[in-house]
Amino acid sequence: MALLRDQGNKNSFDTWASFRAVPKTLETVVGLCLRNERLKRLLYYTDPHALSLPMLTREQTASLIGTSIKIVPKLEIDPDIKPYIIISLDQFVPNPGQTTFKQVMLSIDILCAYKDWNLTDFNLRPYAIAGELDGMINNSFVSGGIGEFKGAKQLILNEHLGGCTLYYNLTTLLDDYEPQTLNAPGSNGYRN
């Protein structure tokens, strides 16, 4: 389906808003998670010594997608559920003075059954997971821009499940541009 753009299609912020960067950003963050062996063990194993247990096999890693690493913001409140994270993009705003950049808030909910919080040496699983995620995202290149840590908050859902939420600012780039037409002679850079 063709996407037609003209001055009448701009939103009130004078910025294009197709959200084409969303899938790539989510794919990038999920990929970072799947490459982090410590994070995968913290999500897969509920044992307090999760970090000393064997690395996950390909099948075990694949099983994390949709169960322990989610991009659909659906909560599962079950006292026996394995730890999981929900990766979301929210608060899309224009980047002042730009028509090709958006600021977006990356939020990551980290949820664990309270019975699985304690690891070893006073380490708590949600914060160990948060440390792994922060090490991968903060001040790192993530889908068009540098991830900038904006804060975290505790997340208490019920008597069985809780954790924390991390927040990062990201800048998306070339949201509406087709790479092959960006610099083509006579092209305005937008899809027709």
Image (cartoon, rainbow, N blue to C red):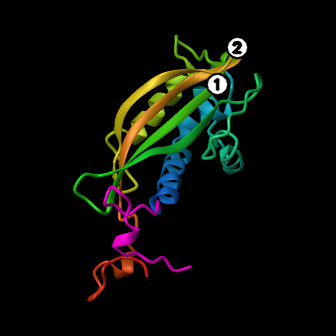
Image quadrant where residue 67 sits:
top right
Q: Observer-nearest residue: 22 or 126?
A: 22
Q: Observer-nearest residue: 15 or 166?
A: 15
- Residue 137 place in picture, x, y as percent: 40, 41
- Which corner quadrant holds the N terminus? bottom right
Q: Which mark is residue 159?
A: 2
Residue named by callout 1: 112
Give the residue at x 71% y 17%: 160
Please identify, in this view, whether the residue under mark 1 or under mark 2 is nearer the observer. Answer: 2
The vertical placement of 97 against 120, above or below, is: below
Q: Which residue in the rendered view is the most extreme toward the top?
A: 122
Image quadrant where residue 75 sits:
top right
**Cβ atoms at labels 1 and 2 below 8 Å apart:** no
Q: Which residues are magenta?
A: 1-19
Residue 13 lies in the magenta stretch: yes
- Residue 38 place in picture, x, y as percent: 54, 34
Give the residue at x 48% y 59%: 24
Residue type marked 2: Glu
